[in-house]
Image: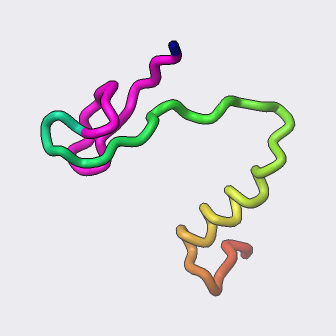
């Protein structure tokens, strides 16, 4: 049996349940993705990060 800790989206509490016992909101798995030195999606994550930081029209390039 695989036990994964979950986090509530609404109140931020950690639990093992799919529904938060405190507020009744949906929870999600709080385990980060595995690290890989060969990261195929780094380019896309960096683009999304820069887009959020500098806006959609400005890609963050000087």
Task: Identify which residue, 53 or 23, lies in the foreground.
Answer: 23
- Residue lying at the far left of the rendered structure: 22
* Structure colour scheme: rainbow
- The part of the image, by quadrant, that contains residue 46 is bottom right
Along the horizontal axis of the image, is 44 left or right of 32? right
Is 49 above or below relative to 34? below
Name the residue: 63% across, 65% down.
48
Q: Which residues fall within the magenta stretch?
A: 2-19
Residue 3, x across and y down, in percent = 46, 18
Along the horizontal axis of the image, is 11 left or right of 45? left
Q: Where does the C terminus fall, quadrant-wise?
A: bottom right
Does 5 appear in magenta? yes
- Residue lying at the far bottom of the rendered structure: 57
Residue 38, x across and y down, in percent = 86, 37
Residue 16, x across and y down, in percent = 33, 25
The main secondary structure of the magenta stretch is: loop
Along the horizontal axis of the image, is 54 left or right of 5? right
Residue 13, x across and y down, in percent = 24, 35
Name the residue: 61% across, 72% down.
51
Along the horizontal axis of the image, is 5 left or right of 15? right
- The part of the image, by quadrant, that contains residue 52 is bottom right
Is 26 above or below relative to 13? below
Is 26 above or below relative to 37? below
- Residue lying at the far top of the rendered structure: 1
Total number of numbered discs in the rendering: 0
Is 36 above or below relative to 51? above
Name the residue: 64% across, 86% down.
57
Task: Identify which residue, 62 or 54, lies in the foreground.
Answer: 54
- The part of the image, by quadrant, that contains residue 6 is top left
Task: Identify which residue, 46 or 41, lies in the foreground.
Answer: 41
């Amino acid at each position: 049996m695989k036990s994964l800790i979950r986090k509530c989206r609404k109140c931020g509490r950690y639990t093992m349940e799919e529904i938060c016992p405190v507020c009744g909101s949906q929870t999600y798995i709080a385990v980060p993705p595995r690290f890989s030195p060969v990261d195929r999606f780094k380019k896309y994550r960096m683009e999304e990060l820069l887009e959020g930081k500098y806006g959609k029209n400005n890609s963050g390039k000087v």
